[in-house]
């Protein structure tokens, strides 16, 4: 569905495979982001944690920040697409981590061969 919304057409099997691979490469969140998320109060609302973390996410890649590099940076298709993959891959991890923080559970890594949805559900619900 994300491919359709972004590019306006359904992907071929090869395009879908490449797209999925690129998104899944970005499902892990930097330890600094996890440390920041753990600094929120135990009763912080998950949406506040998500918003703050997504905003802080850009600090990990200053070379792709328009306010630091210049406003024309996103004219480069490669850079624009890389940011899309980062957000599609990272936001489910951030959301699951925010939820688990709220219920007092530690973050957990999904299984390596899990699909996008399986990965998200595993991160939400695995009791460890």
Image (cartoon, helix red, strand yellow):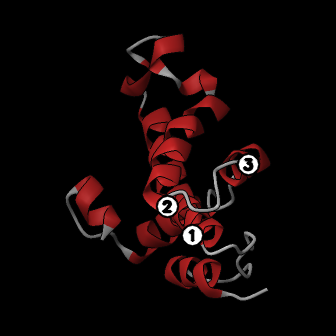
Question: Where does residue 58 sit, x and y in percent of width and height?
Answer: 56, 33
Q: Is residue 44 above or below residue 75?
A: below
Label located before the other in sequence (2 or 1) = 2
Q: What's the mark number on residue 96?
A: 1
Residue at (59% x, 64% y) in the render: 93
Q: What's the mark number on residue 19?
A: none
| Numbered disc in front, either 3 or 2 | 2
Question: Where does residue 82 sit, x and y in percent of width and height?
Answer: 52, 43
The answer to which quarter of the image holds residue 36 is top right
Image side of residue 30 versus residue 86, left or right: right
Question: Where does residue 17 sit, x and y in percent of width and height?
Answer: 50, 72
Tell me the crowding category of disc 2: few under 14, some 14 to 19, or many 20 or more residues within 10 angstroms, Cα based: many
Image side of residue 73 versus residue 124, left or right: left
Q: Distance between the residues labelled 2 and 1?
A: 9 Å
Q: Is mark 1 on a helix, strand or loop?
A: helix
Q: Distance between the residues labelled 3 and 1?
A: 14 Å
Q: Mark 3 points at which residue?
A: 30
Q: Is mark 2 on a helix, strand or loop?
A: helix
Tell me the crowding category of disc 3: few under 14, some 14 to 19, or many 20 or more residues within 10 angstroms, Cα based: few
Q: Mark 2 points at which residue?
A: 46
Label located before the other in sequence (3 or 2) = 3
Residue at (63% x, 72% y) in the render: 100
| Numbered disc in front, either 2 or 1 | 2
Q: Is residue 111 above or below residue 96?
A: below
- Quadrant where the C terminus sits is bottom right
Q: Is mark 3 on a helix, strand or loop?
A: loop
| Numbered disc in front, either 3 or 1 | 1
The answer to which quarter of the image holds residue 72 is top left
The answer to which quarter of the image holds residue 56 is top right
| Image marks 3 and 1: residues in contact by CB distance under 8 Å | no
């Amino acid at each position: 569905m994300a491919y359709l919304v972004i590019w306006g057409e359904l992907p071929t099997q090869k395009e879908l495979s490449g797209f999925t691979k690129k998104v899944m490469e970005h499902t892990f969140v930097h330890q600094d982001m996890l440390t920041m998320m753990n600094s929120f109060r135990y009763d912080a609302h998950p949406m506040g944690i998500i918003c703050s973390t997504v905003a802080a996410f850009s600090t990990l890649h200053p070379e792709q920040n328009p306010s630091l590099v210049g406003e024309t940076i996103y004219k480069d298709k490669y850079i624009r697409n890389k940011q899309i993959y980062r957000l599609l891959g990272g936001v489910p991890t951030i959301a699951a981590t925010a939820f688990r923080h709220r219920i007092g559970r530690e973050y957990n890594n999904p299984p390596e061969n899990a699909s996008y949805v399986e990965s998200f559900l595993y991160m939400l619900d695995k009791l460890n």
